[in-house]
Amino acid sequence: MLNLDSPAGAQADQRLRSELILWLVTVRADGQPQASPVWFLWDGTTILVFSQPNALKLRNLAANPRVAVHLDSDGIGGDIVTIDATAAVDRDAPPADQLEGYVAKYQARIQALGYTPAQLAKGFSVAIRIRPLRVRAF
């Protein structure tokens, strides 16, 4: 999906691997976009997010799998990464605490919240797999 040979594509890939927060935009039943900051794991092809089971984003996705995701800019309007995608619950994904990359990425934040990885995985037990359709990076 990303052209890693282009400077913008390579930069977007690096940011998707290192940034801590991704904004996931779903659409409510009334058509209103719903933006949610989420922790995520980029594998180079898809994005994996974990949700609490009763989150509005899950109801939104059940009705409309089309989503947008984006990273914050560099603060002055540059280093933009936006992705048009589809998303669905991934019942085959392992729990968050069994994903070494996810735990390594968020270990300090998990501890700062007073949780263990297992406690976090229990509360955020629904995996959402996001499949990019179009990436814009500039």
Image (cartoon, rainbow, N blue to C red):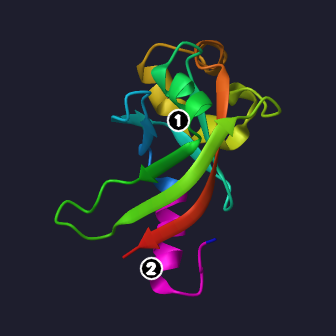
* Residue nearer the viewer, 102 or 112: 102
Residue 94 relative to residue 21: left or right: right
Distance CA(mark 1)–CA(mark 2) = 26 Å
**Which residue lies under the disc numbered 1?**
106
Residue 67 appears left or right of 124: left
Q: What segment is highlighted magenta in the picture?
A: 2-17
> Residue at position x 59%, y 87% from top?
5
Q: Amino acid at mark 1?
A: Tyr
Residue drawn 54% across the image and 67% down it: 134
| Numbered tag placed on residue 8 in the rendering | 2
Secondary structure found at label 1: helix
Magenta span dominant secondary structure: helix
**Is residue 31 within the magenta segment?**
no
Is there CB contact under 8 Å for labels 1 and 2? no
Which of 73/24 is in front? Answer: 24
Image location (x, y in percent) of residue 24: 45, 42
Q: Is residue 16 magenta?
A: yes
Point out residue 26 in the picture as x, y percentages from the top left corner. Answer: 45, 38
**View extreme (right): residue:** 92
Residue 114 image position (x, y, % from top left): 46, 13
Name which residue lies at 56% across and 37% down.
Answer: 64
Q: Residues within 10 Å of mark 2 (few under 14, many from 20)?
A: some
First of labels 1, 2 by sequence position: 2
Q: Residues within 10 Å of mark 1 (few under 14, many from 20)?
A: some
Question: In front here: 30 or 48?
Answer: 30
Q: Residue furthest front?
A: 30
Say if 15 sits above or below 94 in the image.
below
Residue 59 position by quadrant: top right
| Amino acid at circle 2 | Ala
- From the image, which quarter does the C terminus lie in? bottom left
